[in-house]
Image (cartoon, rainbow, N blue to C red):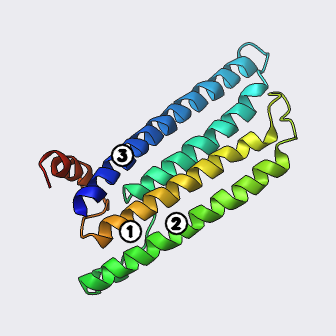
Amino acid sequence: MQATVLRISAVIGVISRISLWLSGAGLVAMTVLIAWQVWGRYVMNDTPTWTEITSVLLMGWFILLGAAVGLREGNHLSFDVLLYVLPKGVNGVLHTVSDAVVAIFGIGMVVYGIQLAAQTWSNTMPLLGISGGIGYLALICGGVLMVLFALERILRRAVGLPTYRFGDDVEDETEAAIHGGA
């Protein structure tokens, strides 16, 4: 069972890396657009108006993709003081409960994101001329990734594998176990 979970984790790891790269590319693109907007406004005296709304759309993508990856890698905000004084078995249960709550939250993001996208799909974003529902696709995608990554953490814990927490190098462990015949 562990070998199957490790293979699943390897595939999810690829999805996570792609999400992280897309998030980083979105951050760089937004930075370039904002610089272009400032240059146009203060140097050229001709503000490119479409850059602001495009930057906001990009920000939604890189924040939500990055948050999902942060969840998978255990870099998300958490309050773990209580966990240091509880027995190790209780810690695993509380981490699983936490991951289940995150998965439920992600499902909410998907469900309500779909509703928001559907309700605004016929609207047109000024200056861009694209559907207003596109702004909610990042919410839906981020929610799907959060559910996927939370379920992976629960599954790994269920079969006795470590989860990604606080900078642990589980990715290398997963790769070694897959290629080493674990």
For label 2, the residue is 103
Q: Are marks 1 and 2 in contact (CB under 8 Å)?
A: yes
Q: Element at badge 1?
A: helix
What amino acid is at disc 3?
Answer: Val
Q: Nearer the viewer, residue 23 or 179?
A: 179
Is 61 or 11 nearer to us in this picture?
11
Which of the two marks, 3 or 2, is nearer to us in this view?
3
Image coordinates of residue 19 in percent, x first then y, are 47, 41
N-terminal-most mark, 3 or 1: 3
Mark 1, residues whose alpha carbon is within 10 Å: few (<14), some, or many (≥20)? many
Q: CA distance from mark 3 to mark 1?
A: 16 Å
Q: To which quarter of the image does residue 61 belong?
A: top right
How many other residues sit within 10 Å of disc 3, few (<14), some (14-19) or many (≥20)? Answer: few
Q: Amino acid at mark 1?
A: Ile
* Residue shown at the point (78%, 53%) measured from the top left: 116
* Element on which disc 3 rests: helix
Task: Work out whether residue 90 or residue 29 is closer to the camera in this orientation and state it.
Answer: 90
For disc 1, the marked residue is 154
Q: Secondary structure at mark 2?
A: helix
For label 2, the crowd category at 10 Å Cα-Cα, with few meaning under 14, some 14 to 19 and many 20 or more, is: many
What residue would you read off at disc 3?
A: 11
* Furthest residue in direction top, as rendered: 44
